[in-house]
Image (cartoon, helix red, strand yellow):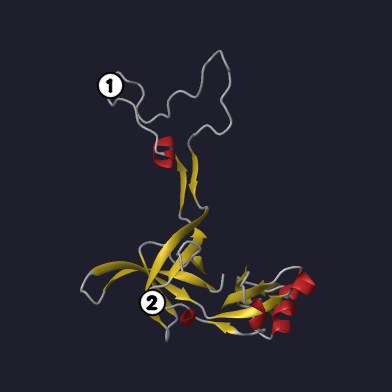
Amino acid sequence: MKKAILATKVGMTQVFNADGELTPVTVLQAGPCVVTQVKTLENDGYEAVQVGFIDKVEKVINKDGTGKKSVAHRHGVNKPEAGHFAKAGVTSKRYVREFRFENAADYKLADEIKADIFAEGDKIDATAISKGKGFQGAIKRLGQHRGPMAHGSKFHRHQGSNGACSSPSKVFKGKGMPGHMGSVKVTTQNLEIVRVDVENNLLLVKGAVPGPKKSLVTIKESVKSGK
């Protein structure tokens, strides 16, 4: 892997290509990310680059006349985190991720990684936490079939039989049942970058990208692009 960046999902829109064809795209605010640590084979046993994304508001404690302490901001920075970022010479970051670049030795602390590392036509893999859908039934969650909808059926959207009553007299582990749906890590592979806005650090990616708006998206060079 040679290229990767952290981004937030802005939303979806549509653009026209040179031939006048309409293309649905997802807009991603990609970077700027800063290098917070460079891991080497000698010190860490492997080579990687740790990057930070989006400034983290430091915790400010206000004391009023009553002597009580009140925290002014929600996103705090503890002392170990503050020391780690200070050593790199960067401001505290909300998101920190690690990439195993093949050219990790070429990076230095506080180097910026921007959207211009990608170009129009590049293929990428996008990873994010999918939208949570709460508790759902077996039909929506697993694609199981429903029963007859007649009045005497008594089996409409129920999941059906779970197992024999006598042998093996149990429900096997892994049986598809209703439960929590969504809110899991999802990777969509081989997405195409339609346009790159270098000035605003925006990537326009063809099609849908997992996750809700404002969610963190990890963009990596595609492993199946064939390039």
Q: Earlier in the sequence, mark 2 or mark 1?
A: 2
Residue position marked by numbered label 1 in the rendering: 151
| Front residue of 54 and 21 | 21
Residue type highlighted by circle 1? His
Report which residue position mark 2 lands on: 120
Above or below 136: residue 218: below
Question: Mark 2 Cα within 10 Å, few/some/many (few <14, many 20+)?
Answer: some
Q: Is residue 174 above or below residue 43?
A: above
The residue positioned 63% from the left and 69% from the top of the image is 100
Percent x, y for residue 215? 49, 65
Amino acid type assigned to the residue bearing label 2 in the image: Glu
Residue at (56%, 73%) from the top-left corner?
2
Q: Secondary structure under badge 2?
A: loop
Query: Front-most of 187 and 164?
Result: 187
- 130 left or right of 68 in image: left
Tell me how many marks there are: 2
